[in-house]
Structure formats: C-alpha cells, structure tokens
C-alpha cells in the first residue's frame, strides 16, 4: 500500500501549480531576456536582436557602481546590527519569563508587519524631530528595523528547540556563561543566524519604500533603477542591473533555505 507522501498529485493540481509558478517567474525571465535586446528605448517582444553590448555599458557606468556599493554597505551594516539585536531579543524572549514578554515579541515583529510606507513616514518624522540629517546612517537605521525581525524570527524558533538540560549540564560541569554560549548555544543556533543574516541582507539590498523616505539625496541600487526606468535611453542597462540584483538576492535566499530545512534536528531536542 502506497503512502500518501509517495502518491502522485492529480493532474489538475499539477497544472495549477505550473500556472502559479509561471505567473511568478515569467516576468523575471523577461528581465533576463531584455538585458540582451538590441532595442534601446522600448520593450518589443520578441526582441529585434540580441547583443552583449549592455553588459559593457553597465560595467563602465560609475553611477551603477556607486549605487551598488552603497547598497552593499548598507545591507552589510544593517545585517550586522540585526544579528546582534535580533539574537539578544530572541534569547530574552525564548529563554526567560518576565512581565510583558509577549508584548515585547509583538513590538519586535511589528515593523515588518506594517506597510513599508508607514514605517518610512514614521522614520522620516523621527529623524526630522531629532534634527538628524539624512545620510548613510539614516538608511542603515531604517533597514535595520525590518532586518532585526528576520533574524529574530529565525533565532527565536531555534532557541525554543534547544533543550534546557543542555545548558544546565554545561553549567553543572563548570562552564561559565560565555563558554556555554560558545560551545552549546552558538553551535545550535549558528545555521539559523546565518540564514537570518542572509535573508536580512537580501531584503536590505533590494528595499525601496523605506529607503525613499530615509535616503535624502543618496541613491541605492533599487532607487537608481527606478530613476533610470523613467528615462527612455539605454533601458536595457536597467535590465542588466536588475538581473544582477536578482542573482545577488537569490543566492542568499537559496542558502538560507538549505541551512534551515533541517532546523528541527537540534542537539538535545529529542524525538
């Protein structure tokens, strides 16, 4: 008798799944296609011809490199801040009991639940209230608000799977708090933190709405792309850059998936 897991899916379900995947991914494939078109100002289908010219044009444009460098720096620092704050919040919520714990948990995840435009307006108002000039650091602070949530969600789930007996045994054997964290806690939550960091980097790298309200006169790569799309000249350059963004954000997400797919298997967790 075959198990339900090995049973073949109905044809209708397969067709529906295929249509759903096509709806999600065909527009991305069109970005890749138009990165090679010979047409400069419009999106003809099929393209009149194919060329690698736009890759060289994008490579030699300093504004592309400036925008990309800014995005990478912002994403890197935002991810680092999120790793520290998200891990500390997760440890406090999952390993201790205190009044208002669930409220704290709700407040931590609230920024990613709110519409981005609300978060952006709130941050812009706060920066204006304290008379903080818009700069690189205002972008970092804006991105850190939702990056913390991604790290927190990964870390808190893994913390709750760690058996408390492991930590108690470490303490009983004479380990101090730092040694317990280094040899017991960190190996168990390491992949969750790495996955959360990868996802946070990807989200920060291609964020648009919050950046619009916190960047001032600076342009991250997604903002640069939006500005280029309103200009009819050399539109394929934008598609080349968009293809790079897709690849840059896809790899961390893929890595995070492979790191967390076996997250239920935690040392000391039992069966």
Image (cartoon, rainbow, N blue to C red):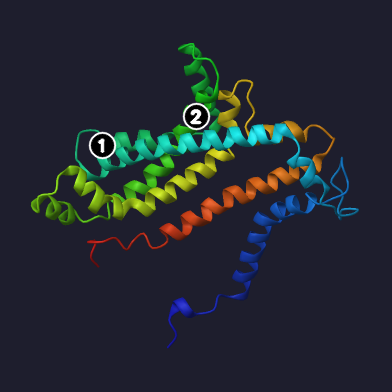
- 72 relative to 32, above or below: above
Tell me the residue at 31%/38% (across/down).
Answer: 89
| Pointer 1 or 2: first along the chain | 1
Tell me which residue sits at (62%, 75%) in the image: 11
Q: Look at the picture and state if 213 lies above or below 259.
A: above
Horizontal relation, residue 138 to residue 208: left or right? left
Residues 208 and 55: in front is 55
Mark 2 Cα within 10 Å, few/some/many (few <14, many 20+)? many
How far is mark 1 from mark 2, CA to CA?
27 Å
| Residue at 9% in and 54% down | 173
SS at badge 1: helix
Task: Tell me residue 165's x, y (percent).
Answer: 15, 56
Look at the numbered disc 2 and give the secondary structure of its residue: helix
Please report contact status of discs 1 and 2: CB closer than 8 Å, yes or no.
Answer: no
- Name the foreground residue: 219 vs 107: 219
Q: Position of residue 114 (x, y in %)?
A: 48, 34
Examine the rendered structure and indicate whether residue 108 appears above or below residue 12.
above
Q: For residue 220, what is the image quadrant?
A: top right
Residue annotated with mark 1: 101
Label 1 Cα neighbours within 10 Å, binned few <14 / some 14-19 / many ≥20: some
Q: Position of residue 179 (x, y in %)?
A: 20, 47
Q: Is residue 106 left or right of residue 18?
A: left
Q: Name which residue lies at 30% across and 38% down.
A: 88
The relative height of residue 151 versus residue 29 in the rendered view (above or below) is above
**Observer able to see residue 231:** yes
Q: Which label sits in the foreground, 1 or 2?
A: 2
For disc 2, the marked residue is 140
Apparent side of residue 8 relative to residue 239 in the rendered image (left or right) = left
- Left or right: residue 44 compared with residue 251: right
Can you say which quadrant of the picture contains the N terminus? bottom left
Residue 208, can we see it? no
**Number of numbered tags placed on the structure image:** 2
């Amino acid at each position: 008798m075959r198990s339900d897991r090995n049973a073949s899916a109905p044809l209708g379900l397969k067709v529906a799944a295929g249509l759903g995947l096509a709806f999600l991914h065909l527009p991305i494939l069109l970005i890749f296609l138009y990165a090679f078109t010979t047409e400069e100002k419009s999106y003809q289908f099929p393209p009149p011809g194919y060329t690698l010219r736009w890759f060289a044009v994008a490579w030699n444009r300093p504004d592309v490199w400036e925008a990309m460098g800014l995005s990478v720096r912002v994403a890197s620092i935002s991810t680092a801040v999120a790793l520290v704050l998200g891990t500390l919040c997760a440890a406090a919520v999952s390993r201790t009991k205190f009044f208002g714990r669930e409220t704290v948990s709700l407040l931590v995840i609230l920024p990613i639940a709110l519409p981005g435009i609300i978060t952006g307006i709130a941050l812009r108002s706060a920066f204006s209230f304290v008379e903080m000039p818009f700069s690189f650091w205002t972008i970092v602070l804006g991105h850190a608000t939702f990056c913390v949530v991604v790290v927190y969600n990964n870390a808190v789930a893994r913390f709750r799977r760690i058996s408390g007996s492991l930590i108690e045994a470490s303490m009983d054997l004479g380990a101090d708090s730092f040694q317990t964290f280094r040899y017991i806690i960190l190996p168990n939550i390491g992949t969750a933190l790495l996955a959360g960091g990868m996802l946070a980097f990807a989200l920060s790298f291609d964020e648009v709405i919050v950046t619009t309200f916190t960047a001032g006169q600076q342009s991250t790569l997604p903002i640069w792309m939006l500005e280029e799309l309103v200009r009819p000249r050399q539109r394929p350059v934008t598609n080349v850059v968009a293809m790079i963004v897709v690849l840059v954000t896809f790899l961390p997400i893929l890595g995070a998936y492979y790191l967390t797919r076996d997250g239920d298997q935690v040392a000391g967790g039992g069966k």
